[in-house]
Image (cartoon, rainbow, N blue to C red):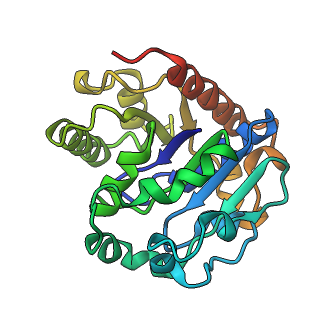
Amino acid sequence: MKVLASYNIKGGVGKTSTAVNLGYLAAREGARVLVWDLDPQGAASFYFRVKPKIKGGSKRLLRRKREILDTIKGTDYRNLDLLPADFSNRNLELVLDHGNKRRRGLRKIIKPLRDHYDFLIIDCAPSISLVSENVFDISDALLVPTIPTTLSLRTLSTLIDFRVKHGLSDVQLLPFFSMVDRRKNLHRLIVERPPKKLSMMLDSYIPFASEVEKMGVRRAPLATYAGHSRAAAAFEQLWDEVKSNLEKPRD
């Protein structure tokens, strides 16, 4: 099972749309996919029309008083399941902080998933915290949507430095530009000539598009209602590039 985390320190950059749309595309290809809505705001759960609630909350789940498989819900899409959000996720760091292995608390609870799914895609809350470090520990790759602006690039640089400082080379970093508006000179310049430090940026980028914003109205992945749109094609290209990078041998 490959574990992918849609992650960024910043909010409002497209993490949830990335998790939902890539999860759907993977399932459409026949892969068994679980999307884990780890953000207490529950946006991914909302898109999949699933109530953001776990009986007993995240505390019970992390202390293994409830098997993770018992909390999973089906979605309207074949091969695609959801581990819903819960508002108690806002206190997840406190629960992890009281565990014996503070930075590896999520590793044991996802173990039962490995026989059931090909991909676990995690929609993360915007933060850099103990929860983030646990996500880094279990992930094969971090998908980092990044708006092409100065502050967003600065935030990405902070994440890159954090990864190096804390020896997190086992997790692959796959940043890409999102919400790109090529009518804006700054967006266009940054996408065409990203800073040298960001040479790992993927070639694919997601445009700023009303079709993506309508996910909140449609409560569905983009490809199910605007499959021929430019944004849908961009997500398909992104998914192909992510898969290609996952298949590459690591140094």
Judge by depth and name the residue closer to the eye, 81 or 155: 81
The single residue placed furthest to the left in the displayed view is 165
Number of numbered discs overlaid on the protein picture: 0
Judge by depth and name the residue closer to the eye, 99 or 198: 99
Which quadrant holds the N terminus? top right
Q: Please tell me which residue is depicted at 28% across the width and 31% down the height of the picture.
A: 169
Q: Please tell me which residue is depicted at 35% across the width and 30% down the height of the picture.
A: 190
* Left or right of 61 on screen, residue 27: right
Q: Please tell me which residue is depicted at 38% across the width and 39% down the height of the picture.
A: 148
Q: Is residue 17 visible?
A: no
* Picture coordinates of residue 116, whole percent (x, y): 70, 47
The single residue placed furthest to the bottom in the displayed view is 56
Q: Quadrant of residue 171?
A: top left
* Left or right of 43 on screen, residue 30: right
- Eyeballing the image, is 223 above or below 175? below
* Picture coordinates of residue 249, whole percent (x, y): 45, 14
- Eyeballing the image, is 52 above or below 167? below
* Picture coordinates of residue 58, whole percent (x, y): 49, 76
Which quadrant holds the C terminus? top left
Q: Is residue 35 visible?
A: yes
Judge by depth and name the residue closer to the eye, 64 or 193: 64
Q: Please tell me which residue is depicted at 24% across the width and 21% down the height of the picture.
A: 196
* Picture coordinates of residue 50, whole percent (x, y): 73, 72
- Eyeballing the image, is 116 above or below 238? below
